[in-house]
Amino acid sequence: MKLAIVAGEASGDLHASEVVRELKGLDPSLQTFGIGGDLLAREGMRILHHAREMGIVGLFNVLRHLRMFNAALNEMTETIAREKPDAVMLVDYPDFNLRLATRCKQMGIRVIYYISPQVWAWRRGRVKQIARVVDRMLVIFPFEEDFYREHGVPVTYVGHPLIDEMKAAARDARPLRAGRSRRKTPWSSPSRAWRERGLAGARGGPG
């Protein structure tokens, strides 16, 4: 399987790298390329642009670097068109990622969006664009699932990795009863949702 990824911020790099690690367990031949940071690079992703270049905040700074953002968008578009991945995974970072999602949709590339933009809190009009260009939204809060379902967006709730890690840590801190062993319980894995829902219908995926 080949996967294009855009994680333009440090938090996105962290969460995307966890997904890639799990997907590699399911498919050791997984190939990834795109925009990300050191954690995705450690998982073997071919970095086209580093997240540190893309994590610019503030309107003035964004405008100053607009040429760089457009160049990165065009390079991602051209690379996706040339390499034809099975799907694209976009992580948060909506101003860039929704533009890329539109281009991917036009090319017939399946778009999976992990960690929703906060359209339920501001710029709600974006949900119409999301419904047009995103094939599957993987959300980390339960109310987001209801929100997207109400707006006709295919959605799967996968849980919040940090919250679930805290729950796991609290569980591991509790004393064990005699004769019982501790078992690891992973969070509602995005990779499982990806396998069961996200890649359904994609080239080379189940469905």
Image (cartoon, helix red, strand yellow):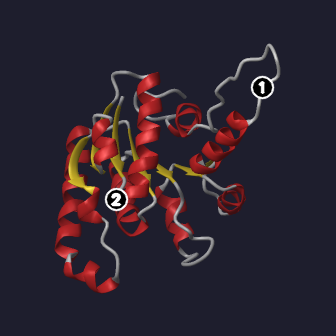
Q: Is residue 86 left or right of residue 76?
A: right
Residue 187, compared with residue 137, is above or below; it is above
Residue 8 has which mark? Answer: 2
The percent coordinates of residue 15 (x first, y second) are: 46, 48
Can the viewer see residue 111?
no
Q: Is residue 17 left or right of residue 79?
A: right
Residue 149, compared with residue 184, is above or below; it is below
Q: Residue at x 52, y 35 (%)?
A: 191
Residue 13, compared with residue 96, is above or below; it is above
Q: Nearer the viewer, residue 66 or 101?
A: 66
Disc 2 marks a residue whose amino acid type is Gly
User: Which of the two labelled residues, at mark 2 and mark 1, occupies the earlier sequence position?
Assistant: 2
The percent coordinates of residue 85 (x first, y second) are: 32, 38
Q: Nearer the viewer, residue 62 or 127?
A: 62
Q: Residue furthest right?
A: 177
Which element is circle 1 on? loop
The percent coordinates of residue 119 (x first, y second) are: 57, 70
Residue 143 has which mark? Answer: none
Q: Residue at x 38, y 61 (%)?
A: 97
Which element is circle 2 on? loop
Can the viewer see residue 150?
yes
Q: Residue at x 68, y 34 (%)?
A: 172
State the quadrant of the C terminus: top right
State the quadrant of the N terminus: top left
Residue 41, compared with residue 69, is above or below; it is above
The count of marks equals 2
Q: Residue at x 49, y 67 (%)?
A: 129
Q: Residue furthest top?
A: 179
Disc 1 marks a residue whose amino acid type is Leu
Query: Residue under circle 1?
Result: 176
**Alpha carbon of mark 2 to alpha carbon of mark 1: how far?**
41 Å
In front: mark 2 or mark 1? Answer: 1
